[in-house]
């Protein structure tokens, strides 16, 4: 089974009616005008969507932050741009902190309303992907005025404990959550105001799960894929999707997207490929498969 993963898109609208600029959205729009719009290039998404369609995935995963301030217009725009994919490919998206940017957007469930069939109606979301692979999608986005700290909450964690109880070492589990559980050893540590508040509780549940685990997240705008060594999480693979529209000296045409080929038997080799339009990458593993349509790809696992 082939999965495509597109990270934090952060779609924005530079102009909004003044009466929509209330609460934290006003701060977000000020930051957009003064800073963020200079490092986000929305046009990169269309090229990326074409390449995602080219690899013919069976499932599309979106780990959140599709928007910048959770405005209904932003969701409307991103839904229209993703239509070429979601029309023909099943897709699952979880909210990021920017998709629950205001208390009103969370209360009105704007993301669920604007992306029906893509954003689950209930959390946690659990489905069987194949004979041995399962998907667990979590909503960890909580509107906050002064920070971006996430929270899964006891209700979801209780359900997760029940859902995982029947999994065996012969099974595989893809976990989709906006927030990371851990960062690679050489990465900057996650700060208190930017991390998942109950990450230890979730990590404990997943560590006790005997299934092979692929943990897919976003939130940190720096793509990576790594597997802990010599620990109780040796059955984990962590994949940070990055931000496809964020440009920098290292990624002048964005941070690309990911392809994961799940083996029929979870214990077998899992092929993970990072696609980038510019050839600048930092990843572990073997050399790239053949590039396609001007993109550079590198297998990292």
Image (spheres, helix red, strand yellow):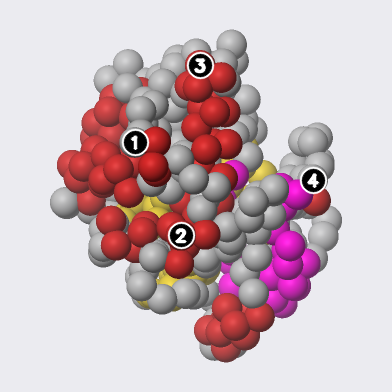
Lower sequence index among marks 2 and 3? 3
- In 3D space, how far apart are the residues under numbered discs 2 and 3 (Cα atoms)? 28 Å
- Of discs 2 and 1, which sits in the foreground? 1
Lower sequence index among marks 3 and 4? 3
Mark 3, residue position = 38
> Counting other residues with Cα less than 10 Å from the Cα at mark 1, is it few (<14), some (14-19), or many (20 or more)?
few
**Is 137 contained in the magenta span?**
no
Lower sequence index among marks 2 and 4? 2
- Residue drawn 54% across the image and 75% down it: 170
Residue 132 drawn at (x, y percent): 43, 73
Mark 1, residue position = 17
> Counting other residues with Cα less than 10 Å from the Cα at mark 3, is it few (<14), some (14-19), or many (20 or more)?
few
Is residue 187 positioned above or below 149 on the image?
above
Residue 261 drawn at (x, y percent): 41, 50
Lower sequence index among marks 2 and 1? 1
Lower sequence index among marks 4 and 1? 1
Residue 169 drawn at (x, y percent): 60, 76
Magenta-highlighted residues:
193-219
- In 3D space, how far apart are the residues under numbered discs 2 and 4 (Cα atoms)? 26 Å
Is residue 252 positioned above or below 190 on the image?
above
- Tell whether label 1 touches label 4 (CB within 8 Å): no
Mark 2, residue position = 104
- Residue drawn 49% across the image and 45% down it: 22
Closer to the camera in the image, 84 or 265: 84
Residue 172 drawn at (x, y percent): 51, 68
- In 3D space, how far apart are the residues under numbered discs 2 and 1 (Cα atoms)? 16 Å
Q: Is 229 positioned to the left or the right of 65 in the image?
A: right
- Residue drawn 57% across the image and 78% down it: 156
- Residue drawn 56% across the image and 84% down it: 159
């Amino acid at each position: 089974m082939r999965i495509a993963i597109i990270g934090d898109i952060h779609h924005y609208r530079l102009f909004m009616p003044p009466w929509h600029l209330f609460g934290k959205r006003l701060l977000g729009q000020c930051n957009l005008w003064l800073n963020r719009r200079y490092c986000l290039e929305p046009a990169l998404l269309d090229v990326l969507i074409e390449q995602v369609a080219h690899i013919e995935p069976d499932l599309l995963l979106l780990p959140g932050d599709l928007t910048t301030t959770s405005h209904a217009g932003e969701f409307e725009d991103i839904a229209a741009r993703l239509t070429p994919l979601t029309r023909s490919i099943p897709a699952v998206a979880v909210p990021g902190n920017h998709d629950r940017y205001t208390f009103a957007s969370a209360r009105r469930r704007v993301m669920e309303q604007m992306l029906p069939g893509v954003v689950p109606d209930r959390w946690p979301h659990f489905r069987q992907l194949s004979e041995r692979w399962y998907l667990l999608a979590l909503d960890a986005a909580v509107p906050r005025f002064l920070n971006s700290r996430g929270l899964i909450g006891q209700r979801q964690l209780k359900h997760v404990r029940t859902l995982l109880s029947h999994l065996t070492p012969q099974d595989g589990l893809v976990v989709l959550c906006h927030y990371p559980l851990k960062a690679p050893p050489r990465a900057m540590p996650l700060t208190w105001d930017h991390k998942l508040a109950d990450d230890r509780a979730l990590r404990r549940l997943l560590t006790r799960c005997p299934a092979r685990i692929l943990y897919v997240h976003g939130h940190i705008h720096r793509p990576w894929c790594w597997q802990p060594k010599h620990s109780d999480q040796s059955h984990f693979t962590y994949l940070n999707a990055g931000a496809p529209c964020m440009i920098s000296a290292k990624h002048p045409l964005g941070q690309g997207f990911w392809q994961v080929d799940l083996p029929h038997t979870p214990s077998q080799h899992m092929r993970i490929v990072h696609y980038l339009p510019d050839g600048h990458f930092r990843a572990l593993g073997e050399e790239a498969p053949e590039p396609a349509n001007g993109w550079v790809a590198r297998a990292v696992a």
